[in-house]
């Protein structure tokens, strides 16, 4: 259960964090759109989590809206392991074993379930590559973040969907202590 819990957390912290090699050909770059203007999105991807000696991987499907989130965490074979949702002041985690945990926010839910408050409230910005200027340690030639320090996490952006300054990240790595999460976005969906 701990490994599944870590995958769920990582999926949102994405969702923070996943890993593979290069962006697949199916991703169409967002041309002319500003990452700062994106308020809703969908992500299909893969996440790999390592905490100490434990390792887990999962497939994720995340739909983010201003007032709602829905994140399915699936086994490599596509079976739903956990579903995280957020809407109208309620965050909920339901596991494959039908265990349900609820809290007012995803951050509070993570503290309840995993014993540590993870910064889920910031993850939507992180996965888009949006940060306060003071958080960014290094940028590439297109002024996109490639290394960031935020909320005690070191975030690295290893690949983008294209060469445009507004291209969305497709490969990210997030580290804090002995926890490392890699997020590989296979498909972005924007309205």
Image (cartoon, rainbow, N blue to C red):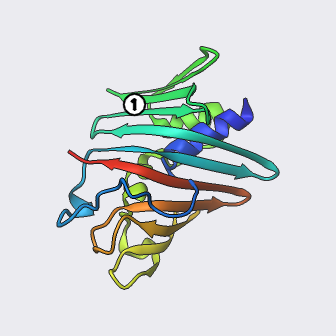
The image shows residue 157 at horizontal and vertical percentages of 49, 68
Say if 157 sits above or below 14 in the image. below
Judged left or right of residue 59, residue 139 is: left
Total numbered labels placed on residues in the image: 1
- Does 78 sit above or below residue 148? above
Q: Residue 52: x, y in percent?
A: 79, 53
Name the residue tied to disc 1: 86
Residue sitting at x 19%, y 62%? 33
Residues packed near mark 1 inside 10 Å, few (<14), some (14 to 19) or many (20 plus):
many
Q: Is residue 94 above or below residue 20?
A: above
As drawn, which residue projects farthest toward the bottom? 141
| SS at mark 1 in the image | strand
Q: Residue at x 32, y 81 (%)?
A: 142
Quarter of the image where one finds residue 10 = top right
Residue 56, picture quadrant: top right
- Residue furthest toward the right? 53
Q: Is residue 188 visible?
A: yes
Q: Can I make out residue 117 in this image?
A: no
Q: Residue furthest front?
A: 25
Camera-nearest residue between 126 and 101: 126
Image quarter of the N terminus: top right
- Figure quadrant of residue 178: bottom right
* Residue 107 placement (x, y as % from top left): 50, 40
Nearer to the camera, 28 or 152? 28
């Amino acid at each position: 259960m701990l490994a599944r819990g870590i995958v769920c957390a990582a999926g949102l912290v994405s969702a923070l964090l996943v890993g593979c090699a290069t962006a697949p050909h199916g991703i169409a770059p967002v041309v002319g759109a500003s990452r700062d203007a994106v308020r809703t999105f969908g992500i299909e991807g893969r996440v790999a989590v390592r905490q100490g000696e434990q390792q887990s991987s999962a497939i994720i499907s995340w739909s983010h809206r201003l007032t709602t989130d829905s994140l399915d965490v699936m086994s490599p074979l596509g079976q739903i392991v956990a579903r995280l949702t957020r809407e109208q002041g309620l965050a909920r985690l339901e596991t494959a074993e039908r265990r349900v945990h609820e809290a007012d926010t995803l951050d509070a839910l993570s503290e309840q379930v995993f014993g540590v408050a993870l910064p889920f409230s910031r993850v939507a910005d992180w996965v888009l590559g949006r940060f306060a200027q003071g958080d960014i340690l290094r940028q590439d030639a297109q002024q996109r973040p490639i290394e960031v320090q935020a909320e005690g996490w070191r975030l690295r952006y290893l690949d983008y969907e294209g060469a445009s300054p507004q291209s969305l990240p497709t490969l990210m790595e997030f580290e804090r202590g002995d926890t490392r999460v890699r997020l590989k976005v296979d498909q972005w969906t924007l309205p």
